[in-house]
Image (spheres, coloured by chain):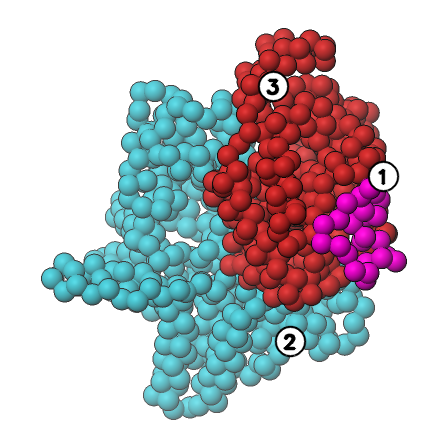
C-alpha cells in the first residue's frame, strides 16, 4: 500500500513544502518583473470561449444589457467602464475583429431572451459584400448548440473563468502565450516586441499605439484597402507614402449598391424584431480617418449607401461624421482610436445616442444626429 | 474536474479545510461523499444517477449475499450483481461497438441492417468504479470480507474522489476498513501526500503533456513521417502514457493520503521490467491484480495443465485489452501481450528464473521495453491504417519529414532520462529514493517541479488519457 506507515518518508514537511513554494513564487515574480521592464503587460488572447461567455450574459441581463456588436472598431474604441458609468447599463462586448456582426445581430434577434440596447457597428463594406461565411456565424451557431457552456456551474466554464482571471493578471501569459515561451522568446532571446493590444477577460480591448509604429499599421491598412502591394522600404515618411498612394486613391470607384440594399433590408428586419419585444438597436458608423476615410468615402459614397439606409430604413442610426468632435479624431492606423481617445469618444457617443442615465427613457428620434 | 485544474485546486482547498474543521467521523465521511459526488457531477451531472444506482444495488445485493446461507441463492445474487454491473458497462461502453460489429457481421451474410445510431456518452470512470464495486460483491460472496458495511461507508468507498474516475482500482477489502474507523492524516502522511501530488502533476503536465504529447500527436495525425519522427512517436507515447497515468495515480494516492487514507501502488517503474510478466507486475498493478484474482484464477489459472493455462492467459489479456475501450485495436494490444506472456511462460516454464548476469539483465530489460513500446502502436492508433502507417514510418530511409528538431530532441532526451530514472529505481520505492535526499535537495526538487509546471502551463488542456477508459 502506497504511503503505508512503515514506508512513509519522514521529513520536516512544512519547511520543505514552503521552501518549494517560495522558490516557485520567486521565479514567477522575477519573470514578471523582467517582462515588465521589457514593456510587456498582462493581456488575454481573444477566443470563442470568451465570446460565448459574453453572449450568455447578453441573454441573461435582459433590459440591463448594452450589447456591442460589430468589428474591431466597436471592440477597441469604446470604454466599457465609461459606458456603464454613464448609462447605468451592463456593457456586453460581442464585437469580433474583422467580422461584420450581422450574424450575431441575427442570432440576438432570434433569441427571445435578448431585449437590451444593442449598438451595431455599421460597416458599408460588409453590407455590400456577398460573403456568407463569417466567424461570428460560427460563434453564434456554437452558442445556440452548446447548451452546457451557457451555464456558469459547468466545470469547463468555471475553469475557463479562473484561467482567464489568472492570465489577465500575469505578464507571463500575455497575448495567450505560455510562460515557457515568454521565458525563451521574450526574456532570453528578446525575439518578440510587446503587443500594443490589451484584452481583458470581459473582451474589452484597447490599443496603445505609442507602443508600436503606428505609421506602419496605417500604411498596411491603406495598402489593403487599395489592394496594393506594400512598399518594400521598412520605414517611409508619411508624406512620401501619401504621394505614392494618391494616384491609386483617385482610381477608386464606388461599389455596387444592390447587394448593400438587399443586406440592409435584413438589418432592418432584425432591428424590428428586437424592438418589438422592448429592445433597442442603434446602427453606428465608427470613426476612421486619413486616407482610410477617403477611400471609404469614394468606395461607399454617403448618398448611395449610408444615407439611403439611415433615411429610408426604420432604424435608429448614427454616423460619426455628424459630430464635429468625432470628425476631428485621428485614428493612428486609420481605422481605430488610440486608448487615450476612448473615454472622450465613449462619452460623446453616449450623449449623442441619448443613452446617458438621465436620458435613456426619453423618446429618441428615428435618425439621430450629434450636431 | 481535472486534478491539473484551478477549479480542482479550489475544490481541494475547500474540502480539505472543511474536513479538518468538521467534528465527528460520520460528518467527515458525509462531507467526503458529498464532495465526491460534486467532483463526479462536474463532468456530466446526470451520470451521477448511474453511480448512485450501481452503488445502491451492489451494497444491497452484498448484504443479501452476506446474510444468506443458501449457496444457490448466494450465487444467484452474485450473478445479478455481475449482470447488472456488466450490463451498464456493456451498454455505455460497448453499445455502439456491438451494434457496429453486428451490422458488419450481418452484412457479411447478406443481411443489410442499419441500426439506429445510439448517442451514448461514456460516463467517465465507469470501468474503474464498476471493477471497484464488483470486488466487494465477489469478495463477500467468497466470504473473504464481511458484507455489513453501512451504506455511507460503501458509497464513500465507491465514489471517493481521488480514485473515482481513473483508479487506482481500490478494492473494498483495502479501503472499507480504513473508512470504518476514524482517522486523520498524520504530518508525514500530509507532507508526503502533497509531495506525491506535486510529483504526479509534474509528470502529467510537464513530461506527458509538454515533452511527449506534441511529438506523438503530430506523428499519429499524419502517420508515415520520417524514421526519426516515427521512433520519437513510438518511444514518446511510451513516455506519455506512463507519465500521464502514473502521474494521475500518484496524485490520487497523494490526495487520499492527505485525508489519511492509504491506496495501493499502481506503478513500479514498468519500463525497467525484466520480461513481460515482470512488466505486468509493475504496470497498472491494481488492474492486473484485479484481472488475476477475479478472472484468471476463477478461469482455472495454471491449475489445469499447460494448454488451459495459455488459454486462460490469453483470455485474461484479451478481456483486459477490451476493458480499455470498445475497439479491436485494444483487443489486438491485449492479444499481443497475452502472446508475449504465453511465450515467456513457455520459455521459462512455471518456475521463475534465477537472477540474470548484468549484461543479460540489461538486454532483457531493453528488449522488453522495445517490444512493449512497439505494442503501444495499436493502442494509440485509432485504426489499423494509422497503426500500419506509424509502423512503416519506423523503417523509412528519410529521417525527418516536418517536425522541429528541438521537439524531437526534447522527446528523446526526456525518454532517455525517464528510462535511466526507472532503471536506477526499479528495486526500490519512490519513498526510499526521496528519503535518501537531504532536505535542501528535497525542497529544491519540489520547487523545480512547481516551476516547471508553471512554465508549461497555459497550453492546450489535455485530459488524462485513462479518463476515456
Quarter of the picture containing the N terminus of chain B is bottom right
The quarter of the picture where residue B182 lies is bottom right
Q: In the rendered image, which residue does mark 1 sit on?
A: A344
The quarter of the picture where residue A77 lies is top right
* Residue occupying image coordinates x 46% and y 55%: B468
Report the chain holding disc 1.
A
Q: Nearer the viewer, residue B247 or B208?
A: B208
A67 relative position to A300: left or right: right
* Residue occupying image coordinates x 62% and y 79%: B152
Whole-number angstrom distance, CA of label 3 to CA of label 2: 84 Å
- Image position, residue B366 (x, y; %): 40, 33
- Image position, residue B446 (x, y; %): 71, 40
**Nearest to viewer (mark 1 / mark 2):** 1
Q: In the rendered image, which residue does mark 2 sit on?
A: B180
Magenta stretch mostly in which secondary structure?
loop
Mark 1 residue crowding within 10 angstroms, few (<14) / some (14–19) / many (20+): some
The quarter of the picture where residue A210 lies is top right
Residue stretch in magenta: A347-371
Amino acid at each position: 500500500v502506497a504511503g503505508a506507515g512503515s514506508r512513509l518518508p519522514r521529513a520536516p514537511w512544512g519547511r520543505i513544502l514552503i521552501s518549494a513554494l517560495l522558490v516557485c513564487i520567486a521565479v514567477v515574480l522575477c519573470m514578471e518583473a523582467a517582462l515588465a521592464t521589457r514593456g510587456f503587460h498582462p493581456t488575454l488572447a481573444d477566443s470563442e470561449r470568451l465570446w460565448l461567455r459574453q453572449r450568455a450574459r447578453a441573454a441573461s441581463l435582459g433590459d440591463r444589457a448594452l450589447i456591442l456588436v460589430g468589428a474591431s472598431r466597436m471592440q477597441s474604441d469604446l470604454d466599457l467602464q465609461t459606458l456603464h458609468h454613464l448609462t447605468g447599463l451592463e456593457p456586453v462586448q460581442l464585437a469580433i475583429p474583422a467580422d461584420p456582426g450581422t450574424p450575431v445581430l441575427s442570432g440576438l434577434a432570434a433569441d427571445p431572451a435578448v431585449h437590451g440596447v444593442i449598438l451595431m457597428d455599421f460597416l458599408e463594406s460588409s453590407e455590400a459584400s456577398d460573403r456568407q461565411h463569417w466567424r461570428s456565424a460560427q460563434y453564434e451557431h456554437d452558442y445556440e448548440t452548446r447548451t452546457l457552456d451557457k451555464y456558469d456551474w459547468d466545470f469547463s466554464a468555471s475553469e475557463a473563468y479562473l484561467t482567464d482571471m489568472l492570465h489577465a493578471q500575469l505578464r507571463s501569459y500575455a497575448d495567450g502565450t505560455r510562460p515557457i515561451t515568454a521565458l525563451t522568446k521574450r526574456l532570453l532571446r528578446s525575439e518578440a516586441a510587446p503587443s500594443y493590444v490589451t484584452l481583458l477577460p470581459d473582451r474589452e480591448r484597447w490599443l496603445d499605439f505609442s507602443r508600436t509604429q503606428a505609421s506602419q499599421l496605417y500604411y498596411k491598412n491603406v495598402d489593403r484597402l487599395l489592394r496594393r502591394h506594400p512598399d518594400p522600404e521598412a520605414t517611409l515618411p508619411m508624406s512620401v507614402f501619401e504621394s505614392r498612394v494618391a494616384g491609386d486613391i483617385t482610381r477608386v470607384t464606388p461599389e455596387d449598391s444592390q447587394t448593400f440594399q438587399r443586406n440592409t433590408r435584413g438589418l432592418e428586419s432584425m432591428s424590428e424584431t428586437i424592438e418589438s419585444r422592448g429592445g433597442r438597436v442603434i446602427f453606428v458608423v465608427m470613426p476612421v480617418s486619413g486616407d482610410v476615410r477617403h477611400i471609404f468615402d469614394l468606395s461607399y459614397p454617403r448618398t448611395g449607401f449610408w444615407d439611403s439606409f439611415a433615411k429610408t430604413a426604420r432604424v435608429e442610426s448614427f454616423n460619426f461624421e455628424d459630430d464635429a468632435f468625432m470628425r476631428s479624431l485621428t485614428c493612428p492606423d486609420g481605422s481605430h482610436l488610440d486608448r487615450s481617445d476612448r473615454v472622450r469618444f465613449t462619452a460623446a457617443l453616449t450623449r449623442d445616442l441619448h443613452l446617458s442615465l438621465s436620458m435613456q427613457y426619453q423618446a429618441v428620434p428615428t435618425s439621430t444626429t450629434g450636431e | 474536474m481535472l486534478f491539473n485544474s484551478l477549479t480542482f485546486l479550489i475544490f481541494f482547498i475547500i474540502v480539505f479545510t472543511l474536513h479538518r474543521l468538521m467534528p465527528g467521523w460520520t460528518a467527515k465521511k458525509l462531507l467526503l461523499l458529498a464532495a465526491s459526488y460534486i467532483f463526479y457531477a462536474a463532468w456530466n451531472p446526470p451520470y451521477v444517477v448511474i453511480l448512485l444506482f450501481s452503488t445502491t444495488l451492489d451494497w444491497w445485493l452484498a448484504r443479501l449475499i452476506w446474510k444468506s446461507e443458501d449457496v444457490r441463492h448466494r450465487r444467484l445474487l452474485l450473478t445479478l450483481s455481475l449482470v447488472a454491473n456488466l450490463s451498464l458497462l456493456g451498454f455505455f461502453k460497448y453499445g455502439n461497438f456491438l451494434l457496429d460489429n453486428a451490422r458488419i457481421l450481418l452484412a457479411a451474410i447478406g443481411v443489410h441492417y442499419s441500426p439506429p445510431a445510439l448517442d451514448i456518452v461514456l460516463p467517465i470512470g465507469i470501468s474503474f468504479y464498476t471493477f471497484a464495486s464488483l470486488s466487494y460483491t465477489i469478495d463477500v460472496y467468497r466470504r473473504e470480507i464481511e458484507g455489513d458495511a453501512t451504506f455511507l461507508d460503501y458509497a464513500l468507498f465507491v465514489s471517493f474522489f481521488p480514485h473515482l474516475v481513473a483508479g487506482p482500482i481500490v478494492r473494498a477489502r483495502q479501503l472499507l476498513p480504513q473508512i470504518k474507523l476514524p482517522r486523520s492524516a498524520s504530518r508525514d502522511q500530509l507532507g508526503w501526500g502533497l509531495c506525491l501530488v506535486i510529483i504526479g502533476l509534474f509528470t502529467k503536465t510537464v513530461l506527458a503533456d509538454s515533452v511527449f504529447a506534441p511529438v506523438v500527436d503530430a506523428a499519429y495525425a499524419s502517420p508515415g513521417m520520417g524514421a526519426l519522427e516515427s521512433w520519437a512517436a513510438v518511444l514518446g507515447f511510451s513516455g506519455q502514457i506512463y507519465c500521464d497515468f502514473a502521474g494521475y495515480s500518484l496524485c490520487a494516492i497523494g490526495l487520499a493520503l492527505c485525508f489519511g487514507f492509504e491506496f495501493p501502488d499502481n506503478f513500479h517503474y514498468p519500463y525497467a521490467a525484466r520480461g513481460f510478466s515482470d512488466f505486468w507486475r509493475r504496470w497498472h498493478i491494481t488492474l492486473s491484480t484485479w484481472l488475476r484474482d477475479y478472472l484468471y484464477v476463477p478461469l482455472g489459472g495454471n491449475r489445469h495443465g499447460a494448454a488451459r493455462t495459455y488459454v486462460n492467459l490469453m483470455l485474461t489479456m484479451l478481456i483486459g485489452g477490451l476493458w480499455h475501450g470498445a475497439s479491436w485495436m485494444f483487443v489486438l494490444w491485449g492479444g499481443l501481450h497475452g502472446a508475449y506472456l504465453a511465450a515467456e511462460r513457455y520459455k521459462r516454464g512455471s518456475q521463475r528464473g534465477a537472477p540474470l548476469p548484468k549484461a543479460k539483465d540489461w538486454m532483457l530489460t531493453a528488449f522488453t521495453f522495445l517490444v512493449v513500446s512497439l505494442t503501444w502502436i495499436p493502442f494509440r492508433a485509432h485504426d489499423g491504417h494509422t497503426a500500419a502507417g506509424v509502423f512503416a514510418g519506423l523503417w523509412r530511409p528519410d529521417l525527418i519529414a516536418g517536425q522541429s528538431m528541438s521537439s524531437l530532441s526534447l522527446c528523446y532526451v526526456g525518454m532517455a532520462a525517464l528510462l535511466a530514472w526507472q532503471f536506477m529505481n526499479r528495486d526500490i520505492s519512490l519513498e526510499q529514493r526521496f528519503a535518501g535526499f537531504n532536505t535542501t535537495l528535497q525542497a529544491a526538487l519540489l520547487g523545480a517541479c512547481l516551476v516547471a509546471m508553471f512554465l508549461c502551463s497555459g497550453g492546450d488542456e489535455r485530459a488524462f488519457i485513462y479518463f476515456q477508459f
